[in-house]
Image (spheres, rainbow, N blue to C red):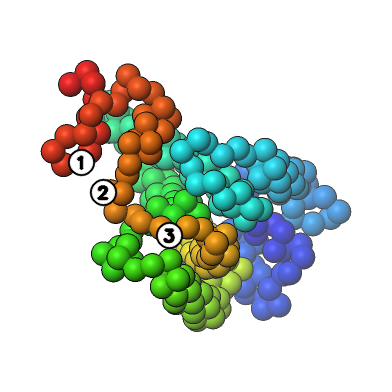
Amino acid sequence: MPAFTLDFYPPTDESQFDKLSALFKRNDVTPNMGGLFGGFADIVDWLAAIGVVAFGYLGIRTVQRAGMEFESWRAADRLAVFIGRVTMMLIVLLTSVMLYEVILRYVFEAPTLWANELSLWLAGFVFLCAGLYAMQQRSHIRIVLLYDAVPRSVQRIFDTISTVLIVVFAFFLIYGGYGEAFDKFYRWETFGTAFDPPIPATMKPMVLFVVGMVAIQAVINLVSDWNAEEVHYGGEDLDEEEIERIKAQVANEGVGDLDVTGQHVSTKD
């Protein structure tokens, strides 16, 4: 990003320009490769930018809904599910990084300089993106004691109020945080450690982006679920047909009867 910023929207202040260009030269993965069109961004930078766009487009177009996922499948739903799929892979990457660091630190006594910051960076993205996926799946935490006790017409009123509150919160968060997020992104602010990843430059804008997407997803959920039948989220509402459907999805050999807490237990137990 510093290369594209210097090429297309360089700082007008000379000292800021010098700081950003010095940061770019220090972190450039291909320092001996000249930029295209006489600028800073070289062929690797352009291929990376194009690859991200192509990866996102193909991912959204080809992502498929799993059997146990929510059935709504609008364009925004596909985006949220695709981001959820990437988040699942980030969890594997995060676990691998932490395991690698533990082995090097306690077995070989040769800890890395980058594993801790990379773990923080990945965990931040996982935390944010998982929230968007949870909103699309309607799996976020709910207090449903009153919601389950009222008819569907009143549930729609509750849904509308909660959606309005989410949208208002997102609006004021983005409105109040845009300036700081843009400044950190524009200056490509780094973490200030030996590894020095651009955590502030990426996480601040990502917070605003995900919160905005959560608000949009909340509106889409409201529209998609408006004509749904009366909704109950309490566990006591599962009937035998629903239980059999869940068993079929997770394989019958791994699910047994309900225990005293109302949870499924393994038949092997």
- Secondary element type, mark 2: helix
For residue 126, say whether it is visible: yes
Q: Against 176, is 246 above or below?
A: above
Mark 1 against mark 3, which lies toward the viewer? 3
Say which amino acid is labelled 3: Glu
Q: At x 61% / y 60%, what residue is drawn?
A: 22
According to the image, label 2 marks what residue?
236
Instruction: Say left or right for 211 vs 74.
Output: left
Q: Position of residue 18 (x, y in %)?
A: 64, 67
What residue is pinned by disc 3? 230
Residue at x-position 53% and y-position 71%: 181
What kind of residue is marked 1? Answer: Gly
Question: Image height check: is 210 above or below 240?
Answer: below
Quadrant that contains the N terminus? bottom right
Kindly identify the residue that appears in the image at 67 percent across and 78 percent down: 13
The answer to whether 9 appears left or right of 64 in the picture is: right
In the image, 186 versus 202, the foreground residue is 202
Q: Secondary structure at mark 3?
A: loop
Residue 227 numbered tag: none
Check disc 1 and report the residue beneath it: 262
Q: CA distance from mark 1 to mark 2?
A: 8 Å
- Of label 1 and label 3, which has the lower sequence position? 3
